[in-house]
Amino acid sequence: MTILLIVIAITNVLAFLFSAIVFWGGKLLCKPFKVKIRYRRFGFAALAVCLIWNLMVLMGYSFGRFRYEVKEVEYADDRVPEAFDGYRIVHISDLHIGGFAGHEAFVDTLIQAVNAQHPDLICFTGDLVSISHREAIPFIQSLRSLKARDGVVAVLGNHDYGIYDRSFHTDAEREADRNALITLQRDSMDWKLLLNENYHLRHGNDSLCVIGLENQACGLSRKVRRGDLKAAMKGTEGSFSILLSHDPTQWNAEVVGQTEIPLTLSGHTHAMQFKLFGWTPCRWFYDHSDGMYIDGNQTIYVNIGLGELMPFRIGATPEITVITLKRNITS
């Protein structure tokens, strides 16, 4: 709630500051023409903007972040192995689980919704926590109850490296926190966590390879660049592969046109937790902000996450994505 009040206060100040700048700029421009401009209209306009924004934020805090939607997506490709035709992957991302403290029942609801999709595989594309591994401890049993025929495969996101915890003063402390989170996921939650590694799933004579990359930020924030795609791809030659990479900026930088990876799953953007009539300001900063993008014979899907950093969502509804693989025999 404190963060929410800070956000409201800052945006309100900015709205009135902007109106004052416009007013004084207009007054100076009109002075030579002896045209008088009164601030009243500018002030009322700023007040109206603030009231509308405050209402939207409060709605996003009270209701928006506790809604979710299940998105059905079909991925058709003649490279999909025959045994994986119709294979159902549930893609989730960016839980930022500490934000659900006090709302444990909602986390259980999300997990039940995931399990209700009867997935063959669950892919989690990072940011389990926001600050520290300690956030995840109260939710271990809930997260362990995620079920899929071939289990849960995950990667780390930038927040999973302890870089935002101000109590850490050394790289060794941050590394210890990261290692504790790795242990929680692998041992306590029974997730298959991939750190520049890959995992082969075999059904009959066919196989599907999941490649898991450590965070590789190639865009706005380069604080965590630990991905090694070459190492992660070792031994995947000739396999139908799905890449899990938290930050979608890595797709343009290192995947498209440089590898044969057909499908990449990412998260990270949250669509900036604001989406109105299908548009999000996130598109000013990310080439791939939300949903599916295709470049030639390569595809990326960006999931906008289930949790949040700021405690509200306006229009950018938390997302559970069900991706069904289809063998496109007409290609």
Image (cartoon, rainbow, N blue to C red):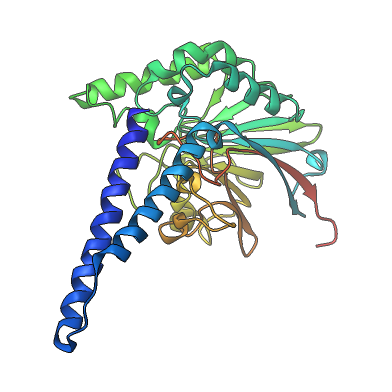
Whether residue 39 is visible to the viewer of this picture, yes or no, is yes
Where's residue 74, x and y in %? Answer: 75, 49
Residues 320 and 122: in front is: 320
Q: Quadrant of the N terminus?
A: top left
Q: Is residue 92 left or right of residue 273?
A: right
Residue at image point 63% right, 52% down: 262
Residues 184 and 239: in front is: 184
Where's residue 220, x and y in %? Answer: 34, 52
Residue at image point 65% right, 61% down: 297
Residues 156 and 272: in front is: 272
Where's residue 248, x and y in %? Answer: 48, 49
Where's residue 275, x and y in %? Answer: 53, 51
Whether residue 218 is visible to the viewer of this picture, yes or no, is no
Residue at image point 29% right, 31% down: 164
Q: Quadrant of the C terminus?
A: bottom right
Residue at image point 82% right, 43% down: 82
Q: Is residue 306 left or right of residue 32?
A: right
- Relative to 99, residue 137 above or below: above
Residues 113 and 29: in front is: 29
Locate residue 88: give its quadrant. Answer: top right
Locate residue 89: give its quadrant. Answer: top right
Q: Is residue 80 left or right of residue 228?
A: right
Locate residue 190: give its quadrant. Answer: top right
Farthest residue toward the bottom? Answer: 33
- Relative to 122, residue 215 above or below: below
Number of marks in the rendered image: 0
